[in-house]
Amino acid sequence: MYAISTTTVKSRLHEVPATIMSAFVFSFVLLFPSLVVLVLSGFFRDFEMKQGTLQGLGFVAMLSVFGTGLAMMMNYKLLSISTPLFASTVTLLMPIVAIIWRILDGEKLTAVQTIGAIIILAGLIFLRSKPKS
């Protein structure tokens, strides 16, 4: 899906600024499905106004704005100044950054995550290497 997204944005929406593009995606494309999931999961029915709950909700909001929103804006900016192939290979690094955050947070790294990171890095090396003539 990254390939379809990056090539579509680059070919059809290249004149739209990165901030406008990420604001649209964040507001309309992500907001509606998120609200549907929250309603269907009973979030609004079971939500309790407690200190820990509000703090957790604040952290999720910070992660969504600064993690997802900022990453989208940087991705669209990178796409506007480079090729779709380069921009899509950079997005493959996101799971590795997430694993680094996980380690810094003191969580355990599983074997499946390590294998996944190795596969992603191998794919990046394969995509970025020049063919031998």
Image: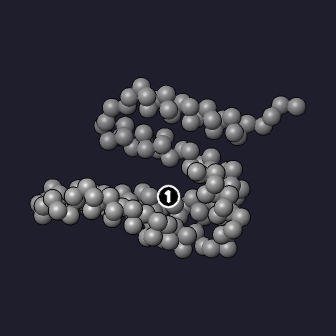
Task: List x then y, in percent, for residue 30.
Answer: 43, 63
The correct choice, above or below, for 27 with respect to 89 in the image is below
Residue reaching furthest to the top: 111
Front residue of 40/66: it is 40
Task: List x then y, in percent, for residue 80.
Answer: 66, 64
Residue 105 shows in the view: yes
Residue 62 shows in the view: no
Query: Badge 1 local density, few (<14 within 10 Å), some, or many (20+)?
Result: some
Residue reaching furthest to the right: 133
**Residue beneath label 1, please?**
71
Q: Is residue 29 left or right of residue 63?
A: right
**Location of the C terminus (image quadrant):** top right
Label 1 amino acid? Ala
Color theme of the render: one colour
Q: Residue at x 25, y 55 (%)?
A: 41
* Quadrant of the image occupied by residue 56: bottom left
Q: Residue at x 71, y 64 (%)?
A: 11
Task: List x then y, in percent, for residue 28.
Answer: 45, 70
Q: Residue at x 66, y 69 (%)?
A: 13
The tally of labels here is: 1
The correct choice, above or below, for 113 with respect to 104 in the image is above
Front residue of 10/8: it is 8
Task: List x then y, in percent, for residue 48.
Answer: 12, 61
Q: Residue at x 32, y 41 (%)?
A: 105
* Quadrant of the image occupied by residue 112: top left
Q: Is residue 115 left or right of residue 106?
A: right
The correct choice, above or below, for 65 with respect to 105 in the image is below
The correct choice, above or below, for 44 with respect to 15 in the image is above
Q: Quick one: SS at disc 1?
A: helix
